[in-house]
Amino acid sequence: MVFVVGKTGAGKSKTASYLAGKFGGTLINAAPAWEKSYLHALTSIGSGLGLAASWYSAGAAERDILQSLQAAPRLIIIDEANHFNRATINFLKTVLNLTRCGLVLLTLPHHMARMSSDSREEFPQLLRRSIAIIHIPSITGEEVAANGNSFHGNSAHAGISR
């Protein structure tokens, strides 16, 4: 798992699109409704993964999503990760524990601090599963492609911290 953190306008969404295209990842955009409805978050994740089910319980959604990811691991890129709630954070920990999927989560710096404060038990556990936190400065579209090298181990220009 990798966190990509940057201010508004830094190019996080362009970076997410670039990564999805370059590595065949699934790009999912979190929404404000995820903060209040865990089932809505799961439905959005399932839909982004191509699952067409209509779930009436979070347990059924979790089971189906995990089975799909176990059968076909992939890179999952979630933009606007600031909309996670505790249950969503716990589910992503489960995805990392039970599948061979990679996660890239993109968010704003102050939202990352808020998630840490609001989810004092869950967020540090998720954070410990990350291999890098990449802080990106404001960049242009052309620079997004150049930053792609950072995901291949060349971290000199990306401001990576561990």
Image (spheres, rainbow, N blue to C red):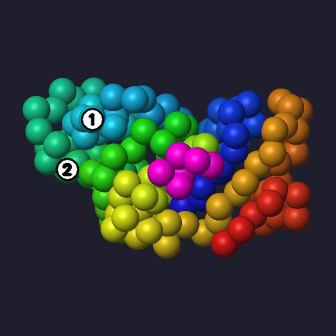
Which quadrant would residue 65 be assigned to in this image?
A: top left
Residue type for callout 2:
Arg
Q: Is residue 112 magenta?
A: yes
Task: Please report whichever mark, 2 or 1, sits nearer to the chain's N-terminal start.
Answer: 1
Residue type for callout 1:
Lys
Question: Nearest the camera: 143 or 152?
Answer: 143
x, y (%) of residue 90? Answer: 31, 58
Q: Which residue is mark 2?
A: 63
Judged by its main secondary structure, the magenta piece is: helix
Instruction: Examine the rendering and report whether any part of residue 156 can be seen.
Output: yes
Q: Which residue is mark 1?
A: 36
x, y (%) of residue 38? Answer: 25, 40
Question: Nearest the camera: 87 or 103?
Answer: 87
Residue range highlighted in magenta: 109-114
Left or right relative to 56: residue 116: right
Name the quarter where the C terminus is drawn: bottom right
How crowded pointer 2 is (Cα within 10 Å; few <14, some 14-19, many 20+) is rated as few
